Amino acid sequence: MVSERQWGATGKGAAVRFLPVDRLDDLVTALRGDGRRVVGPVVEDGALKMAEFEHAAELPFGWTVRTAPGLVRLERRPADAQNADRVFDNGPAWSGIKPWTFPSRVDALSLETRSDGSLAVRVEAPPATATAVIGARACDLAALAVHDRVLAGGPAIDPDYPSRRADFFVVAVECALATSTCFCASMGTGPEVTAGADVVLSEIDGGFAARGDSAAGTRLLDRLALEPALDVQIARATEQVAATRASMGLGVDADGLHDRLLANLDSPRWAEIAERCLACANCTLVCPTCFCTGVEVASDLDGRASTATRAWDSCFTAGFAQVVGGSFRPQHRDRYRQWLTHKFGTWFDQFGTSGCVGCGRCVAWCPVGIDVREELAIIAGPAPTSTATAPQAAAPVLVPGTRILAMARPAAHPGSTRIDYVETTVAAVRPETADTTTLQIATDDPALLAARPGQFVMIAMPAFAIPPISISRIRLDGLELTIRAAGPATSFLARIRPGTKLALRGPLGRPWPVEDAYGRDVAIVAGGIGLAPLRGMLDQVLAERERFESVRLYIGARTPRDRLFVAELDALVAQGVDIRLTVDRAGPEWLGRVGIITELFRGAKPTGANVTAFVCGPERMMTAVTDLLSDLAVPPEHTWLTLERRMECGVGLCGHCQLGTRFVCRDGPVFSVAELGSDLRQESL
Amino acid sequence: MTHTQSGQSVLDRLSPEVLSRLNRFAHDHDYPAGATIIREGDDTHFLGVVTTGRVALRLRVPELGDRFTIVTCEPGEIIGWSAVVAPFRATVDAVATEPTRIVAFDATALRARLVDDHALAAELLPLVLESVSGRLTASWQQMLDMFGSRGPEPW
Amino acid sequence: MAIATTAPARAAVVNRPRVGVVKFASCDGCQLTILDLEDELLALTDRFEFVEFAEATSRRSSGPFDVLFVEGSISSPEQAVEIARLRAATRTLVTIGACATAGGIQALRTAAEHEAFRAAVYPSPAFVESLAVASPVASYVNVDAELRGCPIDAHQLVELLTAVTTGRRPQLPDQAVCLECKRRGLECVVVTRGEPCLGPVTATGCGAICPGMGRGCYGCFGPREGANVDGLARWFIDGPAMGELAPGDVGRLFAGFTGAAPIFREVTDRLEGRPLIQLQPAGAYPAELAAHTPPRWASDARETPDA
């Protein structure tokens, strides 16, 4: 007889059946019969790993697990122990589901120069194999829901993930054992399986209480022709998961954690952790929600053909936040802070959910046993009115992904989430200075031609890394890109010959909000190569000159020889455009101004309330200019900057360019000073 | 923001009383383009304010072939702060890059006056200090060579 | 100096670059690793002229070399002279393997009484000319790039040669071995068995061979960027999840093939993994070689002369 009481929190009214343990293999066989590979926890090198298997007998019958910070020991349960032969009483498998939905290395792009000089460009998105996973835990499913949101929730969609996710069947297990490193109850993600599964199992005497949580799951159970579960079996399943919740130890005080954590960016504890932290990246790689990737380019010996591979990366590596000249997060302290504050804090701002699902893998698999629960308690302190550390206090059970805060995402701009490449031709090359060149790119691609000033493109060419390059002019027949040769890829671009084919992706990012300056005075402030992304804006301002009040351009260059667009700007001066220029140093033949860019404003009166300023240059210069503009009463919401960060994808999927709550590539690179707030000056953020 | 080409002159920030006392030993000097106003190492003969034109402050670096302009003095700015700061010796060459007029206050007279006239000192010296500190912080920025090559990029 | 960005990227290979492979005090294992590149060897010899490669050809050359791969540490006075000569004959000098980049296993002798060693090993030590220390090549001459490991990963060598011909930066990762370990889906031996592993402080490039065979990394690629060796050593000694390891044993973990790398050497000495003996200061190469610029992959990141 089917119980009136329903086991499980979903209340979907699905009947609960009983799957005898000796029929578990029938479940596996049925899934395989549907053409799926079947993945589940198997014992490998002293731990449980989610791996492909053929028969239920390969699952970890009789194994249990003991964990502690930096320690995982898989052990045989004594034959006379209670539940000695159980298969799933051994915690979440260390590798989780992530390698099956988001593999550690995938082909991303292939490029080849054909014999006629044209380019063959292919964004790789291999068809996925239908997969079923058995033994996923509540934390695994919560993590999957996070990945769905991060990788496929937009605005940009990962080219690989959705197909792997499309035909992915989940047989989940409700945990009857909480390891010492488990803390899902405190994160509100488990141990009850409430969403994301097709079939849910609870291991009880002699087999499993089983319910279908999706139409496909229910159909599968129907096919197995199982007996209904007895009331006592359903009650057992219900009690068991409640006992797991009750037995869960140290947790995370998640109440208000976002604010408490971000209020402590300067805690001395970060430096103390850094003495222990190896920055080895294990925590990020075993974390089921970490999604950062980097691009590796391999080419043939001639450099005519290359493939770009996308591989798991980590915010703990030196190269992660590397740009010309150095890393934005040089010390381990900075990198640990980035990881923890993103995972438990700014993840909410970006994705409306916590980045942590409480699986405890980062605790158990840290080779030096750093425990995030402990560190969070010390850094963030207790919640003001907290009652929540004990799991018995019954944190509300939430369906994964329901903790959604308002997401402050700027509207996506046309083309700004583009993941495909367009072949373009270098129409002309114009040297600007000894190390800077302007490429005129011919294209008839409508999206590229609709680019707006301040946006950028990614440039792919066989054999080289794929750099982000800002657009310096938008033409009727293409784009201009002004490039400083500072590395192999940009040096190659600077030497390129007209007629060469380049693959462009874009336009990407948020443009300069020119309309913010309508009816106002315009101040354009450019330092060094920072003039390039402002040139298109000046074009637009001059084209619509009558919509603005005064227009002034302030330019800083290193030396007279390093000035960009000299003839063009001289012509504008001759037409009466107010352009002021200073150089950092000069020889005696230079009769113009020498001094820093802020000196150009000397004597200006603090009456800038009607000014909209657009600023681009080295960050140190921009903060100095920002201070000055603030003194001159230019409102912070009308002061716009463009930031430089490491970018590998340009659409907010690779994680490299994160700054606090933002991805600079997707949410910027243009920001107002008001939007950036204190993050503009926060050290090593 | 109101922004005149000449900016606000240091002279405009002095009270009429102090200005009139300073005027007793003030002289206008005119220099053609290219004229050397003072040489590095010489005694500084005056503290001045540029009224029109432009003055390049240059350092000699013989082995690099020539002189480098470190900073330019624009109209309204102080030139010759070393007239009131020991050892009263010019720290740079000052060269007019275009026809330039400077209001100059005789160094000896000014120094004597500063000892006795505390009201004048209290108004004038903070402006001198402001000018020196502006040059100092500008030098820090220039020392960073922010617009220069920062080294190889990761691409 | 540079290989890279000065050469036109797509030039047809008319004059093949002259490549040499030479050795000093070493086991030849790195050279053999190159010969193991069965799939790539023909393509390599198509594009490069191997003018000196003792394990592969009887051709000999005294230079000049466009690219010279140097295996082995500098262990005798004549080697010190020879490496200076080779440097002068070479555009791009690449050291290969733990011996050439970090002194190798023979650098362990810097911890012992050199004379006593010689007397113990050789019946007539007077005939054996050797230096008191075995040093990385970079202690004598400037090195443009290094390929680490014992032995090297031959695919890194192909990557470097490809970078030379195409004018790009070779991708030689400086991340921890752990990244490659987890990408391969390998369990951590420190966590599952309490077995010491130098992976967290060692540069990857090997593909996590040792953890893949269920044992700890012994650091043959040498220290990675930002290696927190103290943090790791402290955990090995005191970590509640680790077994009983005496400080001296932990110190000796770092005294392997790249034990002469300063950051490893320092922890070995501090934990009294071996007697304290002063190392010769590194970088004391002859002044006449100072004209060679240090490794720089982006030669175009040039200084613009002031006006």
Image (cartoon, coloured by chain):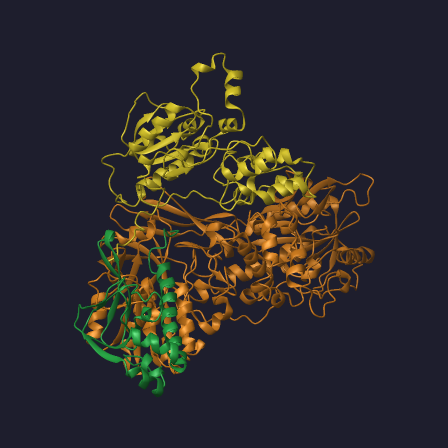
Chain colours: A orange, B green, C yellow
- The answer to whether residue A182 is seen in the rendering is yes
Relative image position of residue C161 (x, y in whole percent): 35, 37
Instruction: Residue at the far bottom: name it.
Output: B16
Question: From what the image shows, is residue C79 above or below residue B66?
Answer: above
Residue closer to the observer: C86 or A522: C86
Residue closer to the observer: A52 or A333: A333
Q: Residue at x 60, y 43 (%)?
A: C232
Q: Would residue B84 appear left or right of A685 to someone viewing this image?
A: left
Question: From what the image shows, is residue C95 above or below residue A488?
Answer: above
Residue closer to the observer: A450 or A463: A463
Question: From what the image shows, is residue B154 above or below residue A606?
Answer: above
Residue closer to the observer: A303 or A211: A303
Q: Would residue A241 appear left or right of A38 to someone viewing this image?
A: right
Question: From what the image shows, is residue A528 above or below residue A408?
Answer: above
- The answer to whether residue C215 is seen in the rendering is no
Instruction: Residue at the far top: name it.
Output: C123
Relative image position of residue B40 (x, y in whole percent): 26, 62
Relative image position of residue A631 (x, y in whole percent): 42, 77
Relative image position of residue A323 (x, y in whole percent): 41, 55
